[in-house]
Image (cartoon, grey):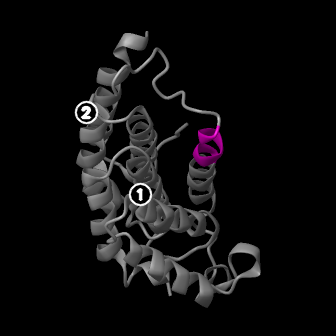
Amino acid sequence: MPKNKAKKGKGRGFHDKGMNNDPLKGDGGNLQEDDCLSEASSVTTANSDQLTEESVTSDGVDGTSLEDIEMKLKEAIEGLSEKTAKYRQGCLSEIKKFFCTTWLVDFLENYRETLSDALERCLRKGKGEEQALAAEVVALLCVQYGAQGDGEDVFTHFKQILTTIILDKSASLAARSKCCLVLGILAFLASDDMGQVLLCMETFDAVFRGSF
C-alpha cells in the first residue's frame, strides 16, 4: 500500500513555427484536456493528506474493478513500445484516462521505470499529438506520485526534456504549448527549489516575450 511520505508544502499556485500572440491558445477541443490536468493538480494539492486505504482499493471508471483497470493499464504501457505512432497515441490516451480517475500508486511501483522510459521516448522521438499526449501523462504521473512526495523525481527527470521541446521552433504548436502547461504544473506540484522554478520562468519568458 502507499507509504505515508507526503511532502507537505510542496509547490505553489498554478494556474512552432509561427507561434501567434497567444501561444497557449489552442483548439477548443484542448480545453477539456487542460481542465483534466488542472483539476487533477488541484485535487492533489487539496487532498494529498486525506488518502485512505479504501480510496486506493476502490473501483475506478464507471465501476470497473481495480484489477481490470490495472490489466488494461499494463497493456497500454506495453503498447508504448509499438512502432505505429497512432497505436502509441491510443495507449497514451488510455493511460491518461485512468490516471485522471483512479489512484494507482501501488500499481505504478512495479512500472515506474518502464513508464518513465516509454514517456521519454515518446517525447524525444514522437511528433505533434504524441508529444502532447505524453506530456499530459507526465503531469498526471506527477499527480499520482504527489501524495508520496515522489513527484519531485518526475519533475527532475522530465524538466529538461520538456524545456527542449518548448524552445524547439520546429516542434508543433500543440506539443510546445502542452509542454509549457505541463512544465508549469510540475513546478507547482513538485518543486521546492526556487532556483529551478526561476529557470522554468526564464523558459516561459523566452517563448512568450514577444506576446507582450
Q: Nearer the viewer, residue 52 or 95?
A: 95
Q: Nearer the viewer, residue 74 or 116?
A: 74
Which residue occupies 70% across, 82% down? 64
Pointer 2: residues within 10 angstroms few (<14), some, or many (20+)?
some
Q: Is residue 33 left or right of residue 82?
A: right
**Helix, strand or loop status at disc 1:** helix
The answer to whether residue 169 is above or below residue 101 is above
The residue range painted magenta reads 29-35
User: Magenta part mainly helix, strand or loop?
Assistant: helix
Which residue occupies 25% across, 48% down? 161
Q: Is residue 202 left or right of residue 32?
A: left
Going by the numbered disc 2, the residue's amino acid type is Asp
Q: Nearest to the eye among marks 2 and 1: give it.
A: 2
Q: Is residue 95 visible?
A: yes
Residue labelled with disc 2: 168
> Which quadrant of the structure image shows residue 29?
top right
Which residue occupies 27% across, 60% down? 121
Going by the numbered disc 1, the residue's amino acid type is Val
CA gap, disc 2 and disc 1: 19 Å
The picture places residue 65, in percent across and down from the top left corner, at 68, 87
Q: Residue furthest right?
A: 62
**Helix, strand or loop status at disc 2:** loop
Residue labelled with disc 1: 138
